[in-house]
Image (cartoon, rainbow, N blue to C red):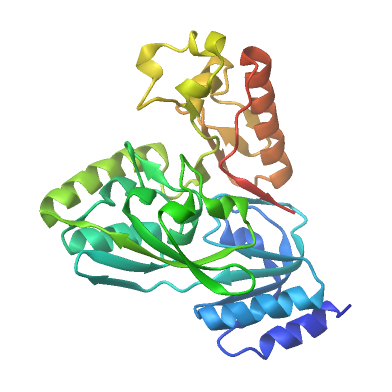
Amino acid sequence: MPTTEEARARLAAIPLLTVSTGTPLARYTRFGIGGPADLYAETSSAEAFIAALASARASGLETMVIGGGTNLIVSDAGFRGIVLRYRGDSLLASNGRVHADAGADLQRLVDFAIERGLAGLETLSGIPGSVGAAIYGNAGAYGHSLAERVVRVRFFDGSAVRVFDRQECLFQYRESIFKRHKDWIIFSTELRLQAADARALRETADSILKVRNEKFPVTMKCAGSIFKNLLLKDLPVEVAAQVPATAVREGKVPAAWFLEQVEAKGMTRGDIHVADYHANLIYNAGAGTAADLRGLIQELKGRVTRRFGIGLEEEVQYVG
């Protein structure tokens, strides 16, 4: 098996690929937590990324692909292997359609559409992360999701570049086919939007952004909500009967409601805190560790299971 140095040399030979060693992954996560990767490589070229992925897999070293890092909890020990990141971020608009590369910031895409008087993305304002991650997890808010606007998605399945239409992506609430095939790499998407008044769209987006920034300040080291909301129809009858009608929103029960019932607000473990104003918000108050973050998440899940007999599912993903 090649050594890390041999793998680095092979990656460094790929044009348009930037390679570094011992790179702290905390730089690439919104929690600001995570030890170093043995090798880290990034590129804005799909072709270079495919070449890098092939080289990394051929090396025999463990390989991981990351996006914007919003929903990643990286081990304090880091990652023993190669971390790859696709950073293509171009945005193009034509005839009511927008082409967006996966590495583009989601807020930048929202603003891009609004500036051109294109409606359909304004309710996503303030959701952190990249376009690729938003496709992967079918990001949404205020009763709408990105899937509603997807025409097609271009991705790499490990052997060839393919294109799926919206139906083939199997979108559901915070789900897509890409979550079932974590080795598939999203490169871009095409979205269908509608003409609208740019000023009205901006007012809608700004009002949503104001609320979100009050709840999740941009300087806060967090991933937004930690747990997925639950569909009322999927809850056990005896559990659903305990949920007040005022807590149900668009057929979903906020995970925060269950967490409030088990007194999650204000809980701490080291420098990891549950917000005292929102039970589904966990943040790094400064020098938090992945061990404490994972421990607090497991404690919250355990409390809800013991009280209600149901399991909360994380929106975050663990690395290392």
Left or right: 30, with 81 as reference point: left
Quadrant of the snapshot with the N terminus? bottom right
Q: Work out whether residue 126 can be spotted.
A: no
102 over 242 or under it: above or below:
below
Report x, y in % for residue 170.
48, 49
Whether residue 58 is situated above or below residue 272 in the rendered picture: below
Q: Is residue 69 visible in this depiction of the protein?
A: yes
Q: Position of residue 67 (x, y in %)?
A: 54, 62
For the C terminus, the quadrant is bottom right
Quadrant in which residue 104 is drawn? bottom left
Q: Which residue is painted at 66% across and 75% down in the image?
A: 53
Between 69 and 180, the residue placed more toward the observer is: 180
Using residue 74 as the reference point, say whether residue 119 is left or right of it: left
Q: Is residue 291 left or right of residue 245?
A: right
> Residue at 19% across / 62% down in the picture?
115
Q: Residue at x 39, y 20 (%)?
A: 248
Residue at coordinates 61% horizontally, 14% vertically from top-left? 308
